[in-house]
């Protein structure tokens, strides 16, 4: 064999190795973002309908003050609400609020993105329970919510109510009220002096034994993580300023108090049977009785701010505060004696919703702060008892036989 040719021929093992390697490609070099002094989004809050896209932009400056025009990192805090591409193009997916985060070079900025579904009116949500539900509450992002009712029922959702799951409350007594101070910490109150507390979003609930109460409890609300109130039978008012470690017990009026709401930590109202209205300006240390307004039982109450509150009750009665220096004047209205109203919520200073029954489940809306009300079509044959709205469009109502309805259009 020619020596030159022999030298050019590869060894057999080398041929096999080369054949197995195929095409050799060099991996792409990772993008290196230099240290930055600032990353700033052009928009810090936006609203989209499900399926809609929106291009977000951000500016960046390096540590020498020179604009940086290279790649940045984009992320969504909840891909169930929206997803985002590598260039900042956001695609709305499902109902709720999530954070858009842009970062790079040790700096970051965020924007709040609210997504509404496109459906109109009131939609049925499946609770998978048959117990009567009395109250409902959602956190500010609109994805996590809770409903409570008979038999110690506690339901929770993490997808704005598209699915609901039962939580273990460790009680079979009826639960009448629920309130959360964060996405993880919440309270529920019910019959037999029951006050429940959770620190993990309701995965587990602990019954408090330090309230010194055996009365049926009808409602609960908190102004801060530490400061809250519970009301119930015999004019009972329980208050705490240390996150439930200790409770002050007060008896007022002798009749059942059905609802309590505060504006901040000092100014509060409580309403109940026989039309009783109580007020406080000192965090509930002392309470005064508002002069007679109605003899009808008051079932639901909401206080939006120091001046604005609305209460509803039997025979279609509606009370609303009038603007006075001491906020003790209430105007009396009536939606018709066929209405038995159970709950009310003010979404803002003008828009509010009341629920109850009028032969079937009833929802009424006000757009003028409670002066006038208009019925809405809710398609429920059962009495509705609890209502909660995050804004003028997003709300939930609950009622008998496990009924849950939801709107993202203000019920329109």
Image: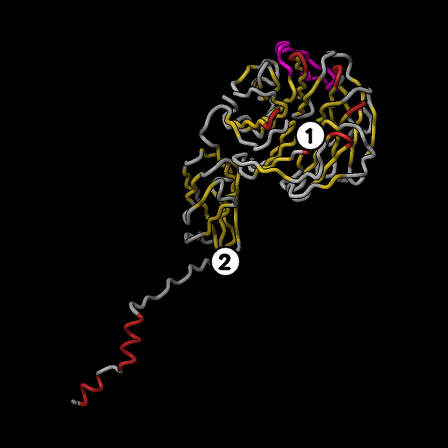
Q: Which residue sits at x=62%, y=32%?
A: 147
In this view, the residue in front, 130 or 260, is: 130
In the rendered image, which residue does mark 1 sit on? 177
Q: Residue 10 location in percent, x, y?
A: 25, 81
Q: Secondary structure at mark 1?
A: strand
Quadrant showing the N terminus: bottom left
Q: Which residue sits at x=82%, y=26%?
A: 286
Q: Secondary structure at mark 2?
A: loop
In this view, the residue in front, 61 or 43, is: 43
- Cβ atoms at labels 1 and 2 below 8 Å apart: no
First in sequence: mark 1 vs mark 2: 2
In three-dimensional space, the C-alpha distance between marks 1 and 2, rounded to whole angstroms, equals 51 Å
- Mark 2 residue crowding within 10 angstroms, few (<14) / some (14–19) / many (20+): some
Q: Residue 105 location in percent, x, y?
A: 50, 56
Horizontal relation, residue 131 to residue 394: left or right: right
- In the picture as drawn, the residue positioned furthest to the left comes out as 2
Q: Which residue sits at x=42%, y=53%?
A: 71
Q: Is residue 324 magenta?
A: yes
Magenta-tinted stretch: 319-340
Q: Is residue 187 magenta?
A: no
In this view, the residue in front, 74 or 259, is: 259
Looking at the rendered image, the disc whose residue lies closer to the viewer, 1 or 2, is: 1
Horizontal relation, residue 378 to residue 387: left or right: left
In the rendered image, which residue does mark 2 sit on? 35
Q: Residue 382 location in percent, x, y?
A: 59, 21
Q: Which residue sits at x=52%, y=24%?
A: 410
Rendered image quadrant of residue 390: top right
| Mark drawn on residue 136 | none
In the rendered view, tell whether residue 325 sits above or below residue 205.
above
Rendered image quadrant of residue 326: top right
Q: Residue 180 location in percent, x, y?
A: 66, 36
């Amino acid at each position: 064999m020619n020596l030159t040719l022999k030298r050019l021929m590869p060894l057999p093992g080398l041929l096999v190795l080369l054949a197995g390697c195929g095409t050799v490609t060099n991996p792409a070099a990772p993008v290196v973002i230099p240290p930055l002094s600032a990353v700033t989004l052009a928009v810090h809050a936006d609203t989209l309908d499900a399926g809609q896209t929106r291009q977000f932009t951000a500016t960046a400056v390096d540590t020498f003050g020179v604009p940086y025009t290279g790649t940045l990192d984009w992320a969504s805090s909840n891909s169930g609400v929206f997803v985002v591409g590598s260039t900042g193009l956001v695609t709305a997916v499902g109902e709720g609020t999530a954070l858009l985060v842009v970062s790079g070079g040790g700096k970051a900025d965020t924007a709040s993105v609210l997504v509404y579904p496109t459906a109109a009116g009131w939609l049925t949500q499946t609770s998978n329970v048959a117990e009567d539900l009395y109250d409902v509450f959602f956190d500010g992002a609109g994805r996590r919510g809770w409903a409570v009712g008979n038999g110690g029922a506690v339901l929770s959702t993490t997808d704005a109510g598209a699915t609901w799951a039962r939580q273990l409350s460790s009680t079979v007594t009826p639960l009448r009220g629920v309130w959360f101070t964060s996405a993880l910490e919440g309270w529920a109150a019910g019959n037999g002096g029951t006050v429940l507390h959770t620190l993990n979003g309701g995965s587990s609930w602990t019954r408090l034994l330090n309230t010194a109460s055996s009365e049926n409890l009808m409602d609960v609300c908190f102004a801060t993580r530490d400061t809250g109130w519970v009301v119930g039978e015999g004019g009972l008012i329980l208050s705490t300023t240390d996150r439930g470690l200790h409770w002050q017990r007060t008896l007022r009026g002798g009749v059942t108090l059905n609802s309590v709401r505060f504006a901040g930590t000092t100014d509060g109202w409580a309403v109940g049977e026989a039309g009783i209205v109580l007020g406080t300006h000192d965090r509930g240390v002392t309470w005064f009785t508002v002069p007679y307004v109605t003899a009808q039982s008051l079932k639901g109450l909401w206080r939006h701010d120091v001046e604005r509150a609305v209460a509803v009750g039997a025979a279609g009665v509606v009370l609303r505060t009038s603007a006075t220096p001491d906020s003790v004047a209430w105007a009396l209205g009536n939606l018709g004696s066929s209405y038995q109203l159970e709950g009310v919520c003010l979404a803002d200073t003008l828009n509010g919703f009341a629920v109850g029954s009028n032969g079937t489940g009833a929802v009424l809306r006000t757009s003028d702060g409670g002066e006038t009300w208009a019925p809405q079509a809710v398609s429920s044959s059962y009495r509705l008892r609890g209502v909660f709205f995050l804004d003028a469009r997003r709300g939930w109502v609950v009622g008998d036989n496990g009924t849950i309805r939801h709107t993202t259009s203000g019920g329109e």
